[in-house]
């Protein structure tokens, strides 16, 4: 089995695998552009046939041929029915883009790589066998992670765009839209949007998805609609299940006062600036409750609740700038904790040198292989404590893989080279590496938030 899988330990395969996972879990969420999409196609087309040809070495030719056919089918409209069926069991997403087919020549590179002489990263037989099993699991994980369903961005405040159209699109084809015809005008109510999973689900991220809402909606509906001329003021009233909405558009975006009435009662009012909420928004219900949201440039800063005209609660909400400042503070606290642990380890080393904790060889190996589990547990606990951490299953598995790859070699250095001085050093090293991983994650979040 090891001889069949040794191709998985070569530098090109490991590089493409790591790049694919990092791109799908980090780069796509941060940038979501043409480059990140093409990276997934290129890396995926390389590692997919190489992996399966290692599993089924007698059918290498068929693996590459079927990989090309499957890729073309997956990127076509004909795969829509299959994807809908798969979504009933497992969430899958796919973007139809003919330019993705430009990545097909990578199959030829994969074929030449499989036929060539393999250069292994690990020469030790025992480590190589463990490595092939681990890389195999990481590869299967990457195949699943690359087709995660996209995040759904919902809206707390109504979102409409105004377009020109002589026909009403079929609403059954667009679950995120509702359509209202006004002569040659088409009012589109946007219920939600499909976007990449955000780094932080806040008002700032929501505002980014609204910047070109009329343009993205027009592109989604294709040739049946056209954009409104910029600067043209249009006032309309729309009746829907939520009530009667009074809308004011500037060009194709909401701009000015918005109000919603139901059964003759005003239940919602506020203001828009080119599709972005601003000023004070007021919500009323039948229980004599009233909520006022203070919004600055689309970001809520305070929510006040009133009952019978009296203030009953007031809550401040962090803006994106507040969140970034808090992350800097948290990183500083984690760095201080790391510094403290390093000082304790240094003190233990100096007090006991040249003596060290005596362990049998197999215990040392077992400790190095098991310690990353406790590193991940400390990492998970720190993230729950310091940030709003709600990873999906793919991110959880990815964090386990990356922490094992990063901390296992470090544990070998600590156990076999630096050597443990006290039993407590084992816990201290796990906490130290867990802190380092948390700082890495939070720093990546900080970079993504400041882009």
Image: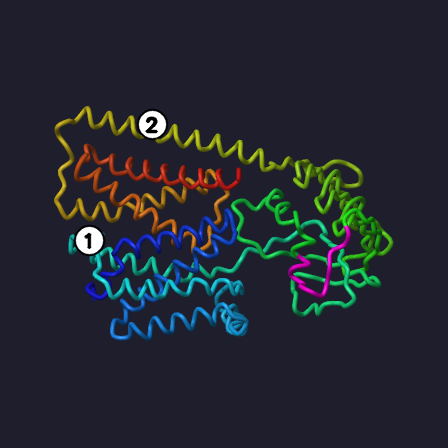
The residue under the point 39% across, 28% down is 336
Q: How far apart, in angstroms, are the residues tagged by discs 1 and 2?
A: 34 Å
Magenta stretch in the rendered image: 217-229
Residue position for label 2: 340
How many tags in the picture?
Answer: 2
Mark 1 touches mark 2? (CB < 8 Å):
no
Q: Is residue 74 left or right of residue 372?
A: right
Q: How is the image coloured?
A: rainbow
What secondary structure is the stretch in magenta mostly built from? helix
Pick whichever, 142 or 17, lies toward us: 17
Pick whichever, 20 or 378, lies toward us: 20
Residue 351, located in which quarter of the rendered image? top left
Per the image, is 228 magenta?
yes
**Residue 432 position (above or below residue 64):** above
The N terminus: image quadrant: bottom left
Q: Earlier in the sequence, mark 1 or mark 2?
A: 1
The secondary structure type at the circle numbered 2 is helix
Residue position for label 1: 127
Pick whichever, 404 or 74, lies toward us: 74
The secondary structure type at the circle numbered 1 is helix
């Amino acid at each position: 089995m090891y001889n069949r899988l040794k191709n998985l330990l070569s530098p090109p395969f490991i590089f493409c695998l790591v790049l694919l996972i990092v791109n799908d879990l980090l780069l796509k969420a941060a940038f979501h552009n043409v480059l990140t999409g093409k990276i997934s196609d290129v890396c995926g087309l390389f590692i997919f046939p190489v992996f399966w040809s290692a599993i089924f070495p007698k059918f290498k030719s068929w693996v590459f041929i079927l990989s090309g056919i499957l890729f073309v089918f997956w990127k076509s409209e004909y795969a829509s029915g299959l994807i809908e069926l798969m979504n009933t069991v497992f969430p899958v997403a796919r973007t139809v883009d003919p330019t993705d087919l430009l990545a097909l020549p990578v199959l030829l590179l994969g074929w030449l790589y499989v036929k060539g002489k393999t250069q292994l990263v690990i020469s030790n037989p025992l480590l190589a066998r463990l490595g092939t099993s681990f890389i195999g699991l990481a590869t299967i994980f990457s195949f699943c992670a690359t087709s995660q369903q996209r995040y759904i961005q919902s809206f707390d405040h109504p979102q409409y765009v105004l377009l020109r159209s002589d026909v009403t699109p079929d609403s059954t084809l667009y679950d995120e839209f509702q359509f209202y015809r006004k002569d040659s005008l088409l009012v589109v109510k946007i219920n939600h949007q499909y976007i990449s999973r955000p780094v932080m689900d806040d008002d700032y991220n929501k505002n980014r998805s609204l910047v070109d809402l009329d343009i993205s909606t027009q592109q989604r509906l294709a040739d049946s609609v056209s954009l409104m001329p910029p600067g043209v003021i249009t006032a309309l009233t729309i009746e829907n299940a939520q009530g009667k909405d009074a809308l004011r558009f500037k060009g194709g975006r909401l701009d000015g006062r918005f109000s919603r009435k139901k059964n003759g009662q005003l239940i919602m009012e506020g203001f828009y600036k080119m599709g972005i909420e601003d000023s004070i928004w007021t919500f009323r219900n039948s229980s004599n409750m009233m909520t006022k949201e203070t919004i600055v440039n689309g970001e809520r800063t305070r929510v006040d609740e009133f009952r019978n005209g009296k203030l009953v609660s007031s809550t401040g909400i962090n803006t994106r700038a507040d969140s970034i400042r808090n992350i800097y503070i948290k990183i500083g606290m984690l760095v201080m904790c790391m510094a403290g642990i390093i000082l304790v380890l240094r003190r233990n080393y100096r007090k006991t040198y040249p003596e060290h904790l005596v362990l049998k060889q197999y215990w040392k190996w077992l400790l190095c292989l098991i310690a990353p589990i406790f590193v991940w547990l400390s990492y998970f606990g720190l993230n729950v404590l310091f940030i709003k951490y709600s990873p999906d299953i793919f991110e959880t598995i990815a964090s386990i893989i990356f922490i094992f790859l990063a901390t296992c070699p470090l544990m070998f250095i600590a156990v076999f080279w630096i050597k443990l001085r006290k039993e407590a050093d084992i816990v201290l090293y796990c906490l130290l590496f867990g802190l380092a991983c948390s700082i890495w994650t939070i720093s990546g979040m900080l970079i993504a938030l400041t882009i």
